[in-house]
Amino acid sequence: MPSEAINEAINEATRREWRELGFYYDRDDVQKIWRLVGSRSGLANFADALAKFAADPRNARQSEHEHFGPYFYLEVGSWPHAEITDHWVAGPLPSLERLSLNIRKLLSGVKPGQAVLLRSSFAPSSPYELRLEVTPDNFDPAKEDPRCW
């Protein structure tokens, strides 16, 4: 298979993974922000993933974690205190469950074009912000990723 065809197959797989995830994310290390971009239902997938992680008793041990997305650099994990760092959103399982519920509540009242900041309510002393950017319902998360086009 020619390299151009291989590259396109990889790009298509990456696009498919973003669409399955339901939102796009990236990390800005200069501004220290995790950006999650998606429709309300797409961002609700992140809340679902948090709730699922928090509900699994196997994740109660410190440093248990799960990676998300095609590049796997966003992690959700268990940690003694809530934090948002350059590699994860973590905390005790009950804190992650509360974050999930808070995201659902906030998404119900936010409109496309608006953003929600979560650091102050989840982990105020964390070095990174967690920003959810709400888009219209027809948003394609793969189109946010310049590396897969």
Image (tube, helix red, strand yellow):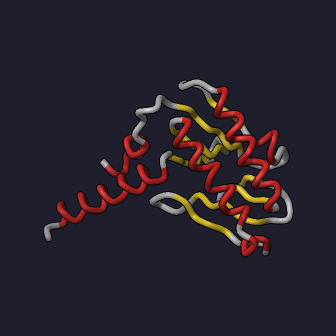
Residue found 37% across the figure and 57% down from its top? 14
Residue found 37% across the figure and 41% down from its top? 143
Above-or-below relation of 148 to 108: below
Judging depth in this view, the residue of 2 and 90 nearest the camera is 90
- Residue 130 at x, y percent in the picture: 68, 43
Furthest-left residue in this view:
2
Above-or-below relation of 40 to 90: above
Q: Quadrant of residue 30?
A: top right
Residue found 58% across the figure and 24% down from its top? 111
Above-or-below relation of 88 to 142: below
Check the picture and name the quadrant holding the N terminus: bottom left
- Residue 122 at x, y percent in the picture: 80, 46
**In-image side of 24 versus 50 (left or right):** left
**In-image side of 138 versus 36 (left or right):** left
- Residue 35 at x, y percent in the picture: 59, 42
Count the numbered circles shown: 0
- Residue 109 at x, y percent in the picture: 67, 26
Q: Quadrant of residue 7?
A: bottom left
Residue found 56% across the figure and 49% down from its top? 45
